[in-house]
Image (spheres, helix red, strand yellow):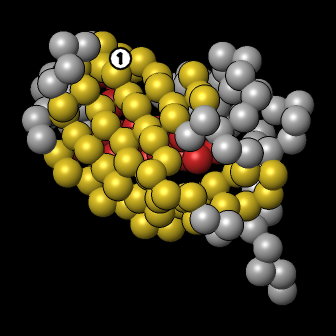
Amino acid sequence: MSSRLELTDNQHCFACGPQNPTGLQLCFAVSNGRARAEVTADARFQAYVGIVHGGIVATLLDEAMAYAAISLGRWTVTAEMTVRYLKPARIGERLILTGEVIRNTSRLAECTAELCTEAGERIAVARGKLLKGEPVPATQTTCRGVAP
């Protein structure tokens, strides 16, 4: 059994897959260990009335960290993540999602992420360790057309 982490993107990721009609379809702009996306959650992702489910918030933060790490050229999977929820995310509200690599080694990328309102109020923050896999093919691009 190989210990090598082989990851393949088939465009159906729940968080960012453009071919997943029930997913979040996030679209990140990435550069040098940073990622940014805007998101407005609809009622499909509701917990209590008008509030985005905490699992969706965690997914958003996880994906921001992943894209920040992927921008450095290798696919990743989350090995560890801690989320701190600061206030509810509201259904229908435009939110800003950012991720950043804060430490980069040969096997791991340590990252942070924030989900904020357009006014800059922090909704949730995360910190995580992402395990690196295969190199991202040169032909692979993000939805903004920016190659890692």
Q: Is residue 13 visible?
A: no
Q: Which residue is mark 1?
A: 40
Q: What residue is rendered at 47% in x and 26% in y?
A: 36
Measured along the vertical axis of the image, is residue 12 above or below residue 74? above
**Could you say where residue 129 lies in the image, as x and y percent from the top left?**
47, 63
Q: What residue is rendered at 13% in x and 33% in y?
A: 88
Name the quarter where the C terminus is drawn.
Answer: top right
Image label count: 1
Task: Kindly state the secondary structure of the residue where label 1 is placed.
Answer: strand
Quadrant in which residue 128 is drawn? bottom left
Q: Residues within 10 Å of mark 1 (few under 14, many from 20)?
A: some
34 to the left or right of 131: left
Quadrant in which residue 140 is drawn? top right
148 to the left or right of 125: right
Measured along the vertical axis of the image, is residue 22 above or below residue 58? above
Q: Is residue 77 visible?
A: yes
Measured along the vertical axis of the image, is residue 127 above or below residue 118? below
**Could you say where residue 110 lies in the image, as x and y percent from the top left?**
47, 58
